[in-house]
Image: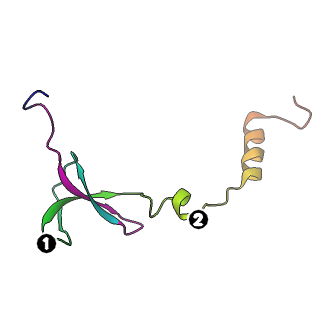
Amino acid sequence: MKPGIHPTYRPVVFRDNVGGLTFLTRSTATSTRTIEWEDGNTYPVIDVEISSASHPFYTGNARVVDTAGRVERFQRRYGLTSTGR
């Protein structure tokens, strides 16, 4: 590896705003905010919108989508009729 061209790879805490999950990992991501972790050390914290704690695929809380309304809206928008014209 060439010296001086790679970003710093260090411990960073990622925090899910919705699910409340926080985990410590290593990353090149940077942040000006910090958090004191369970081991007593202070690490940069990155807030994320979604993680495995809040994503519907992992939680099983999928939203019901109104597919009939989507089909009707598509037909109205593009002028399709039941005869196919």
Q: Quick check: is 19 in the magenta stretch?
A: yes
**Front tag of 1 and 2:** 1
Distance of mark 1 from mark 2, alpha carbons?
35 Å
Amino acid type of the residue tagged 1 in the rendering: Gly
Q: Is residue 1 left or right of residue 54?
A: left
Q: Image quarter for residue 82? A: top right
Q: Dot 2, how many residues are within 10 Å of its Cα: few (below 14), some (14-19), or many (20+)?
A: few
- Element assignment for label 1: loop
Q: Which residues are magenta?
A: 5-21
Instruction: Note whether 57 is above or below 1 in the view shown.
Output: below
Amino acid type of the residue tagged 2 in the rendering: Asn
Q: Which mark is residue 55?
A: none
Q: Quick check: is 22 in the magenta stretch?
A: no
Q: Image quarter for residue 38? A: bottom left
Q: Dot 1, how many residues are within 10 Å of its Cα: few (below 14), some (14-19), or many (20+)?
A: few
Residue at 88% across, 31% down: 84
Q: Residue 28 location in percent, x, y?
A: 21, 45
Q: Residue 73 location in percent, x, y?
A: 73, 45
Instruction: Note whether 72 is above or below 12 in the view shown.
Output: above
Q: Please identify the quadrant where the C terminus is shown.
A: top right
Q: Image quarter for residue 53? A: bottom left
Q: Residue 54 location in percent, x, y?
A: 46, 63
Q: Is residue 40 left or right of residue 20?
A: left
Q: Residue 60 location in percent, x, y?
A: 58, 63
Q: Which mark is residue 61?
A: 2
Please state which of residues 50 and 81 is positioned toward the viewer in this rendering: 50
Q: Is residue 72 left or right of residue 35?
A: right
- Element assignment for label 2: loop
Mark 1 = which residue? Answer: 40
Residue occupying the far front of the picture: 1
Residue at 78% across, 39% down: 75
